[in-house]
Image (cartoon, rainbow, N blue to C red):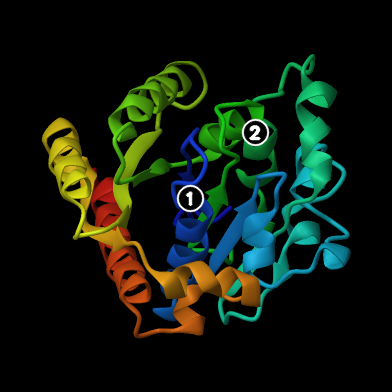
Amino acid sequence: MNSQTRIITIANQKGGVGKTTTAINLATALAAIGENVLVVDLDPQGNASTGLGIDRKNRDVSSYDVLMQTASVEDAAVVTAVPNLSLIPSTLDLLGVEMEIANAADRATRLRRAFRGNPAASPYSYILIDCPPSLNLLTMNAMAVADSVLVPLQCEFFALEGLSQLLETVSQVRASLNPQLNIQGIVLTMYDGRNNLATQVVDDVRSFMGDKVYRTVIPRNVRVSEAPSYGIPAILYDLKCAGSQAYLQLASEVIQRERHLRAA
């Protein structure tokens, strides 16, 4: 794999925090500014695959096959309707992968073996991995291969409660599997400025995590919610809506942070 390729795992063990929406739209925003991007759908629900317009009947080779070492990255990647954006789709086969590889010595590093040192991954400047909403073996594989973790955090009352558990998992992966792993940043999602609680959550998370929290906040936005049902990212569905504009700003911040992390 190209040494300039950056792998970012998008993870949160809580569902409904905008994780897949962030994966799809951040990837599209990066592709729109000329980066060559690959999304790896590691969630058995396959929402990232659906949201990028890849029908279930067209997922002949998937992230399951890559994990089971029966297909390469090159075999599994399919082009999407978004220029510069490819996808390794997900299938329901992923539901059984944990049991299938539970006793394998390399069970947590299958994805790392597939990507690191693999010339097929070299065309991509960014690889974004969309994880399931749990801290399971799939998420461990995603963290073991990643340069950094991006955490979407919904602006709701229990946001910080789940965050501490996720940060502990990142520390464990760094200690045992991947000493290079960093927190790329925390992106606050589903923000509603009319809600006093949302504003309080933003303030609390910023005071707790400091500059790890992106300046960009993703608003709660109807157009962003509608886009997946059309199989296209919100940025293509409605570029001018507040949500799309926020994801373009987030992409700019991610690139700035990646340059800083590379230089560190």
- Residue 166 on image: x %, y %: 41, 27
Residue 3 location (% of width, % of height): 48, 52
> Residue shown at 77%/39% (left/top)?
94
Q: Quadrant of the C terminus?
A: top left
Q: Is residue 183 above or below residue 4?
A: above
In terms of secondary structure, where does tag 1 sit?
Answer: helix
Vertical arrangement, residue 158 with respect to residue 230, above or below: above
Residue at the spot of label 2: 138
Residue found at x 42% / y 17% = 175
Task: Report x, y in % for residue 258.
Answer: 31, 54
Q: Position of residue 245 (x, y in %)?
A: 31, 76
Does the rendering let one see residue 231? no
State the separation of the CA atoms marked 2 and 1. 15 Å
Front residue of 199 and 39: 199
Q: Amino acid at mark 1?
A: Lys
Q: Is residue 199 visible?
A: yes
Dot 1 surroundings within 10 Å: few (below 14), some, or many (20 or more)? many
Check the image and report above or below for 164 versus 2.
above
Q: Which mark is residue 19?
A: 1
Picture quadrant where residue 105 is located: top right
Q: Mark 2: which amino acid?
A: Leu
Instruction: Specify whether 259 is left or right of 167.
Output: left
Q: Earlier in the sequence, mark 2 or mark 1?
A: 1
Tell me: residue 201, above or below residue 107.
below
